[in-house]
Amino acid sequence: MSDVRYPFTAIVGMPDLRLGLLLNAVSPAVGGVLVRGEKGTAKSTMVRALAGLLPTLAAVDGCRFACDPAAPDPQCPDGPHDRPSASERPAQLVELPVGVAEDRIVGSLDLERALAEGVKAYEPGLLAKAHRGVLYIDEVNLLQDHVVDLLLDAAAMGRSYVEREGVSVRHAARFLLVGTMNPEEGELRPQLLDRFGLTVEIAATRDPAERAEVVRRRLGYDADPAGFAARFAADEQALAERITAARELLPKVELTDVALRQITAVCAAFEVDGLRADIVMARTAVALAAWDGRTEVLEEDVRKAAQLALPHRRRRNPFDAPGLDEEQLDRTLEEHAQPQEPSESSEPSEPEESSEPEEPGGSGEAEGDGEGDGPEDDGPGPDGGPGGGPGGGPDGGGAPEPASGPEASAAEPDEPLQQPVPAQHPAPARESAPVAAGDPYRTKLFTVQGTGHGAQGRRSPAETTGGHTVRARRPQGALSRLHLTATLQAAAPHQAARGRTGRALVLRKDDFREQVRQGLESNLVLFVVDASGSMAARQRMTAVKGAVLSLLMDAYQRRDKIGMITFRGADAELALPPTSSVEVGAARLESLPTGGRTPLAAGLLRAHEVLRVERLRDPSRRPLLVVVTDGRATGGRDALARSQRAAGLFAAQGTASVVLDCESGPVRLGLARTLAGLLGGTAVSLDELRPEGVASLVRENRQDSRRENHRENRATTMRKAA
């Protein structure tokens, strides 16, 4: 790989990403930029190219924290800096690897000096190295949540606080924060998204001419990096000078009262949580004005600032896609474009009051009720039209209901009501259109038994790199997390025999001990969903989809990977290969049709094969199988027996499993619970999935136990009396 960076000005297209990066270069107080886009869109290339445009900076010689000689940090651990010598150096580009540990970010005790010299010294981390430069996080959505929170805290405060291992250090950490991510690999939590100042969505161009130019330039760079960079040197120099000029102009830019009112009105209109969005929009609008060489913020600056700062802050739940209503934005800006605020402030309340009574007056409620009840009453419906036609009314009801209206009087003499009834019976056998999922809710926690060694998460117990230290042990391989106390205890009895004379300890390889930390891991949650005709009743499938959506939400919050297999008709389909993108799983679930036979065995065998492959790819990630079914199996003479044999494969491997029992009605066969027993797992009904449902079951069981104990005590008393 060449040491010559790809020129920033040679990148084709992506104006929003280009602008977002340049605004942060002008004003790092904007808060960084998160770049969301599909793979192969030059996200990383553009970020690395930006570092070459930043002005050189003067730094105190010998200072590991790059203090500015004109205003050195009074709390610098390498200070104080009195009349320091300084030298010019380029701005640093610090890249954060996905598997980085917390002590590598913030710094830690210098163990080499502590053990060799007996002194307590601080070893700076990546935040100190990135001070006054660029901190670049590729695949930020794959970092552990506490690491992302740590980085965003430092970026927001401009200072890093280190309190660990007996070391207490504070140092400046002001940097341009850039994160990139592919949403297909999983989302950041909304709380972390809000900490990024700007967000830019990018996608590869579909214009053949632009794509050809991208390929042409990339091939030219690969063939001769230095020569290619020289072609754009003049453009790079001009852009770097413009950044410097905008930085100098930034303090002179005025944010007028009208512009500030527009900013706050836009944030209020889009119902953004908190006030961080208002502050970020104000800083972005000021940076935009400085970038354009102006000293006053205009409406166009506010509009562009909203487009960059608000879309990712409008998510209300993890499955919402970022976005912004452009018409609402323009309308809000127009309403607050004039300085006469008092006369306008009272006007919006009137149309809001007048518009509210109109909503209940529509027919939406009646139509919604009719859709919910219709499919269950198709057969005996008295309407005469297919699917409980317009004559049936909103309740899909019987003959007495329509008799009170004029439409009913016209329908009574015709007597066609009983003729279409036989035609309604075959309808449920056909494929049903997808139905919407019910509202998600908090679910019962399902975990994998035992202690794992997987990636840090929030589900099952595991030995992890985070968590709390539970014990010490001899290193297994390379020493990664030194347990200092246990190491000193192991070495202390041998110091006299080893001839120790000074303060430094005499250590041997056998003295070292490493920490064993216990926390929670993330798992692979594989859903196997029955989409056959037995699940096709509208209300039933709505409840089932709502339950699966709730489990998907739970998997999102616990940082799990998920996969989804559906089975219907004659075979099973891998609807969603294992991924960290829970949003894709929710979309696939929403569009899931139902109908046909129930090939339960095919679904289980497909799940067994998927888990076999995933064990080879990621042996440390333990699976959790969630089978959503009523337990029925059709599609052959021995369909049920084949599904039971397939279930035995999971039990033999010790795969943790849960069966979500979807059986309903007064007569229940209990096949789902039988399947759970063969899997070696547990069965949970839809009612038991909710925490309140579980609590009520526990209360009922306690009451039954108390009644039984009361009967036994009473019987014992009577026997003794007799």
Image (cartoon, grey):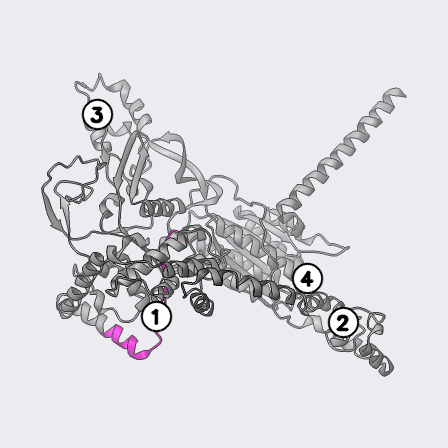
> Of helix, strand and loop, which one carries label 1?
loop
Residue 630, quarter of picture: bottom right
Determine the residue positioned at 35% across, 75% down. Answer: 206
Number of dots carrying numbers? 4
Quarter of the image with the N terminus in it: bottom left
Looking at the image, can residue 310 be seen? yes
**In this rendering, is residue 381 above or below 310?**
below
Label 3 Cα neighbours within 10 Å, binned few <14 / some 14-19 / many ≥20:
some
Residue 707 in the image: state x and y as whole percent: 78, 34
Q: Is residue 609 above or below residue 697?
A: below
Residue drawn 32% across and 34% down? 163
Q: CA distance from mark 3 to mark 4?
A: 71 Å
Residue occupied by mark 3: 118
Q: Earlier in the sequence, mark 2 or mark 4?
A: 2
Q: Amino acid at mark 3?
A: Gly
Drawn side of residue 41 relative to residue 421, left or right: left
